[in-house]
Image: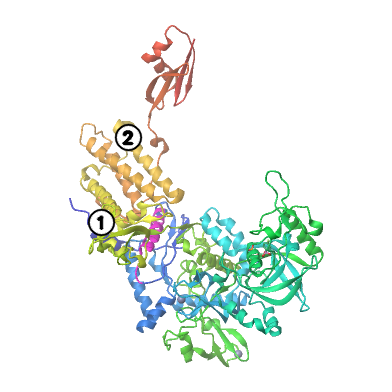
Amino acid sequence: MREYNFSQIEEKWQQKWKEENIFKTENKVEGKENYYVLEMLPYPSGKLHVGHARNYTIGDVIARYKRMKGYNVLHPMGWDSFGLPAENAAIQNGAHPALWTKSNIDNMNRQLKMMGLSYDWDREIATYTPEYYKWNQWIFKKMFEMGLVYKKKSTVNWCPDCQTVLANEQVEDGMCWRHSKTPVIQKDLEQWFFKITDYAEELLEGHKELVNGWPEKVLTMQKNWIGKSFGTEVNFKLVEKDENLPVFTTRVDTLFGVTYAVIAPEHPLVDEIIKINPSIREAVSAMKNTDMIERTAEGKEKNGINTGWHVINPVNGEKVELWIADYVLMNYGTGAVMAVPAHDERDFAFAKKYDLPIKVVINPIDKETKKEIMIEASEMKNAFVGSGVMTNSEEFNGISSKEALVKIAEYVEAKGFGERTTKYRLKDWGVSRQRYWGTPIPALYCEKCGVVMEKDENLPVLLPTDVEFTGNGNPLETSESYKHSVCPCCGGPARRDTDTMDTFVDSSWYFLRYCDPKNTNLPFEKDIVDGWVPVDQYIGGIEHAVMHLLYSRFFSKVLRDMGLLSSNEPFKRLLTQGMVLGPSYYSANENRFLYPDEVEMKGSQAFLKATGEEVQVKVEKMSKSKNNGVDPEIMINKYGADTTRLFIMFAAPPERELEWNENGLAGAARFLNKIWRLVLENKEYLTDSTTIDYVKLSKEDKGLVRKLHQTIKKVTESIEADYHFNTSIAATMELLNEMQDFRTQVLGTDKETSESKKIFREAMVNVVIMLSPFTPHFCDELWQEMGNKGMLFLESWPTHKEELTVADEISIAVQVNGKLRGTLEVERTVSKDELEKKALEIENVKKFIEGQTVIKIIVVPGKIVNIVVK
Ligand code: ANZ
Ligand code: ZN
Ligand code: ZN
């Protein structure tokens, strides 16, 4: 018998698949339903990591499974290939970002092919190519025409290391997401924005379409990110200026409890106040310079500046002080708040710190006595944020605060003091980046015509090559040929915008381009995209819950409104795969994470080989900083792609964390070797493919048939339910054990019947088919070994026969007057008369009815025979 040589087999089949171009997908196939399965496209960092391997294996198994289920499956791959690392590499070694990017793509492409993934490579896209980014510019322009793109000066998050603007989502704990030690600062810049806020309500409403297909966690994260609040805008009167100060509150029931008002340091009033009261100038600019995230962090001490100005509460005419405070944000609500320290935590802390008055307007209700508890402002240790009974609120006293929330809002509206509104926390999407390696923004500035967009026929606006990568500022500024251009309107001189687009623009619609990747007239043809989108199954990391997954939803809706596609939502089902964990080894003496080869294991304890020091072992997310990552390519070389894939799929269900361990890989390899031997050593039993005659089966034959059908059922149901591939594989393993027993105990012995070989073969055929999505090369090879022509992807997924999954011998309890007196082993199809007769023949039963009269016999089919005697 030849050994299982995975590298030879994998190379052979990858070659064959390629030659016959079997994963090429047509947009329409007569008689087949389309199914689109997609994994988030990678950034070409240079090497696949184990998270990629997991992501793509999950997608590939689904793609292969759905093909066998008879769908026309689209399963594409591409490269999210603009972005900072390529530019940083250019700064470091002088090579153009395109070269770095290209060589990374080539390497990762090779690695993907090693994994045996069933992509239609004819549809491969890379976002850094002019063929792709042309359409970013085209869409940008169309959005500009629709009023969905605008420019405004705004305070932005700026990373001094990246020398660029960061989206809010790219700021993590006040630090740059790319530079975890660099604090993000605030800077005023003219920026391009996408009006995602126009779609805030629809993005929220659209969740209704997604509740059954998306993880609840992602929907919740998006919901919080969009942050819809119902509230009231109330106009306070400024005392020092003849003007209103609108504030936004979600608690208008506390309106009578306002004891001061606060504006953000960026509020337009602040400049006017400084003119009159210059002594606060410095304090204000210091406050503006602390970064947003820190300013608003929960539990953070609040800082304030008394402006010396006042406002008047419209409902009771009370005059209160106006403050500037860091906990108020300019870009939420109106940038001004009415402060109610008795009922708001932040206001309470602030009032205590600056000794401002506190006025109670809601009293709690005692849970037991149901009586109002009078609270004293001077004795409060915390704000009372709950609901209760209104007090100190004139005509609203005595009613519940819940009722007052509506009543006071109505009152405010009736009196013309303000009105009810909804606010969203979601901000417009700032897309300008002062970097080179991105899509050039197709805008120009002309002295005569103002801001103009490049003509369609001049798209794409290409990235210039006469640039310098110095590491300081925007390289595009160093290209004279780029900066000085021609106005598309008047033909006069015009300055080109040197910003490029946030790379999240690229990934917001790439899945549509896969449908029609070579189109030169449009980003994609509507009819074609409508045949594929929404994507049936999307797979990727939870870290994309609010950026990529929200932006893609926004883009889909915008493109729909442009008439380019029909679907409201881009992704019908979303699977967020769990992280991959591995053991890290930390040496306290050396104060560093060790590499695995520096460590020696003794049982579950780990020791540093060089010194014998016992080191800490912790299973945690794989990362470079912990030296606990595994390189998928090394694994594939060592164990083969099929074994690696099988391990990944078997070790945990896809949405859960996966603990990497080499024992598991070795286990997967053993399993494949076992199947290998079972096929290659038993070929003589695997040749009879004539139809099984189910009437002629022995007890043993029936046993294997039953196990086979139970397995088909279980494997299929586990995949269909929630892609619980681990359960599917486990079921197949069980079947294989029974087949092994059958081989030794039945085949070649006197128990072998005319049907035994056929059944053995039937079971093996199904094992190979059902494993083929997981271990495709291995299964194609066995398929051929078993004498089949063609490849497995052409086979249909098996279906089970329910009647064959149940045992045909059943046991029936026999009772006399409700007490168990015996059991019967009978054929499932036994008749009622037969059952009664057999029950009465049991010795023990006879004993208990002796000398008495049988009144009646109750038969519960398949379960009980109860004989009633007297
Ligand atoms: C008075 C009040 C009394 C408030 C009370 C709360 C409790 P959400 O629910 O997140 O929308 N607020 C309004 N604009 C703000 C801004 N620009 N920066 C910081 N805080 C702001 O929060 C709305 C509440 O947050 C508003 O309701 C306002 O404080 C504050 F017992 O008004 B409230
Ligand atoms: Zn940075
Ligand atoms: Zn012009």
| Residue type beneath disc 2 | Gly
- Residue drawn 28% across and 64% down? 634
Residue at the farthest top position? 851
The magenta-colored residue range is 46-65
Identify the colour scheme used.
Answer: rainbow
Residue highlighted by disc 2: 703
Residue 63 part of the magenta-drawn span = yes
Q: Position of residue 246 (x, y in %)?
A: 72, 71
Q: Position of residue 384 (x, y in %)?
A: 66, 57
Residue 843 part of the magenta-drawn span = no
Q: Residues within 10 Å of mark 1 (few under 14, many from 20)?
A: few
C-alpha span from label 1 to label 2? 45 Å
Q: Could you tell me if residue 588 is visible in this image?
A: yes
What is the secondary structure assignment of the residue under circle 1? strand
Picture quadrant of residue 492: bottom right
Q: Residues within 10 Å of mark 2 (few under 14, many from 20)?
A: some
| Residue type beneath disc 1 | Met
Q: How many marks?
A: 2
Residue at the farthest bottom position? 492
Name the quadrant where ligand 3 sits: bottom right
Taking depth in this image into account, of 1 and 416 the one nearest to the observer is 416
Main SS of the magenta part reads: helix
Taking depth in this image into account, of 528 and 121 the one nearest to the observer is 121
Q: Which mark is residue 601?
A: 1
Q: In the image, is the residue at mark 2 within 8 Å of ligand 1 by its beta carbon? A: no
What is the secondary structure assignment of the residue under circle 2? helix
